[in-house]
Image: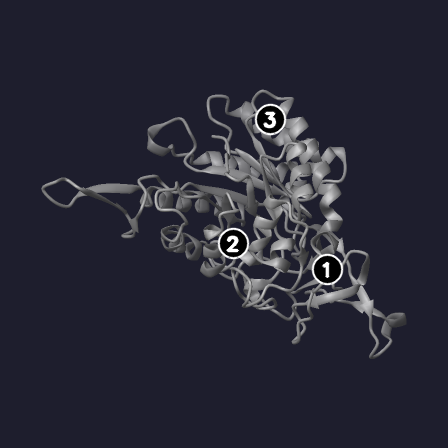
């Protein structure tokens, strides 16, 4: 089914969607059409703040580090326009397991705005081996079934209340819509193979795992859970063709089944990136040093924010064009992510074919209020780091306030 998020503006998987409180703030915002969790594993990720870090920098002077997660005293971003901020991170995934996010859903949706409004969709971002992802799909599908409301009669007048199967009262008869995003594109895992989204055999292994045990929801021909792939920034044609040919090959192998992929999130951060700043204390390396630490000691990580906006636009435009060339792939929609921080960036993404637009770096800097500003078209500056005074709360630098995964 179409994504049809209203408005078509969401957060992308990032550490500002780590905790229940993060997700509740995103869900309550009238300016988000859906909510995405931080990418998680079945059993959580071993977060180490000494090597999993982030920083924000001014795009007109990348050596001007505005703030880092490894700094005890955070600097203000006063006066920095949204479009002028970039981020670099050396993170992995959420420290919380998949079950943490699924258990939080009833509490999050009970706090939705508007009494009878249909619940927003929640995209559960996951990763792991093909077998682990297939298991995650089954677990999320079971959660979807448990969240379905049931009607019980409470008096002789046959008045009804809605409760769901996990014991939470709901205020609407409509079922919350869960989707699963498979993150195959994190660039920051040292001593690991390249992100699977760069490899056709790896892509096929995930598609095959999803189809190997494809139960059908409500005995229909539709897959049990709408599932998408999160891709890295592709930089040349063979990478796009690997993805498209994998989807086609798998579809042709199973002509009687629905394609297991219904959307693509493009893109994740751009790997192999490095930010340096002047080391005034020691003058080491001709006065420059890496702003972040990582497991290899190089400080190299994933780049996000304004610098990746053009490549993200190119990826969304190319994927939309290539998907539309094949009858069996035309129904796959694209969520555009990368450097969107204002109305103009949102409209550019939509103009090249994004069914919805995701935001991460600007959310990390400005807080949940950024979504309202994007939709309204206000040019406001990002006046401060997200802190206790911002909608959504929280202090940058804790593990739940890191940047894009």
Q: Are marks 3 and 2 in contact (CB under 8 Å)?
A: no
**Residue occupied by mark 2:** 40
What whole-number distance in Å separates the C-alpha atoms at marks 3 and 2?
Answer: 28 Å
Secondary-structure class at tag 1? strand
Give the residue drawn at x 41%, y 52%. Answer: 102
What whole-number distance in Å separates the C-alpha atoms at marks 3 and 1?
Answer: 44 Å
**Residue occupied by mark 1:** 80
Residue 332 versus residue 128: which sits nearer the camera?
332
Query: Please, is residue 181 above or below residue 385 in the view?
Result: above
What whole-number distance in Å separates the C-alpha atoms at marks 2 and 1?
Answer: 31 Å
**Residue occupied by mark 3:** 248
Picture coordinates of residue 263, whole percent (x, y): 55, 35
Secondary-structure class at tag 2? loop
Residue 297 versus residue 105: which sits nearer the camera?
105
Query: Please, is residue 103 above or below residue 49 in the view?
Result: above
The mark nearer the N terminus, 3 or 1, is: 1
Secondary-structure class at tag 3? helix
Residue 133 visible from this viewpoint:
yes
Coloration of the structure image: one colour
């Amino acid at each position: 089914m179409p994504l049809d998020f209203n408005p078509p503006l969401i957060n992308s998987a990032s550490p500002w969607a780590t905790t229940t409180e993060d997700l509740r703030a995103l869900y309550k915002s009238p300016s988000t059409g859906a909510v995405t969790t931080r990418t998680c594993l079945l059993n959580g990720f071993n977060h180490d703040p000494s090597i999993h870090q982030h920083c924000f920098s001014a795009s007109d002077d990348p050596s001007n580090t505005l703030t880092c997660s490894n700094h005890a005293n955070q600097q203000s971003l006063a006066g920095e326009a949204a479009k002028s901020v970039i981020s670099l991170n050396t993170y992995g995934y959420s420290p919380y397991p998949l079950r943490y996010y699924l258990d939080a859903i009833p509490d999050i949706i009970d706090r939705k705005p508007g009494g009878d409004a249909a619940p927003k969709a929640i995209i559960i971002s996951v990763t792991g081996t093909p077998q682990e992802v297939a298991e995650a799909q089954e677990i999320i599908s079971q959660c979807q079934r448990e969240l379905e409301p049931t009607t019980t009669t409470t008096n002789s007048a046959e008045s009804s209340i809605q409760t769901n199967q996990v014991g939470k009262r709901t205020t609407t008869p409509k079922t919350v819509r869960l989707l699963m995003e498979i993150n195959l594109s994190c660039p920051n895992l040292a001593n690991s193979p390249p992100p699977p989204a760069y490899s056709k055999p790896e892509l096929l292994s995930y598609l095959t795992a999803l189809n190997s045990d494809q139960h059908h929801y409500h005995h229909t021909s539709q897959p049990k859970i709408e599932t998408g792939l999160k891709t890295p920034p592709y930089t040349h044609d063979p990478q796009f063709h690997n993805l498209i040919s994998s989807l086609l090959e798998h579809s042709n192998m199973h002509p009687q089944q629905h394609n297991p992929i219904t959307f693509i999130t493009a893109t994740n951060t751009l790997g192999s990136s490095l930010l340096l700043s002047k080391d005034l204390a020691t003058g080491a390396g001709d006065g420059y040093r890496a702003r972040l630490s990582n497991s290899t000691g190089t400080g190299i990580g994933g780049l996000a924010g304004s610098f990746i906006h053009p490549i993200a636009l190119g990826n969304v435009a190319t994927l939309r064009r290539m998907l539309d060339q094949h009858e069996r792939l035309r129904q796959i929609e694209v969520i555009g992510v990368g450097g969107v921080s204002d109305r103009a960036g949102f409209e550019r993404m939509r103009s090249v074919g994004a069914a919805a637009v995701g935001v991460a770096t600007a959310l990390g800097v400005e807080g949940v209020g950024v979504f309202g500003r994007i939709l309204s078209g206000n040019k406001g500056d990002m006046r401060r780091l997200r802190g206790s005074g911002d909608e959504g709360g929280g202090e940058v630098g804790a593990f739940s306030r890191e940047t894009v995964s």
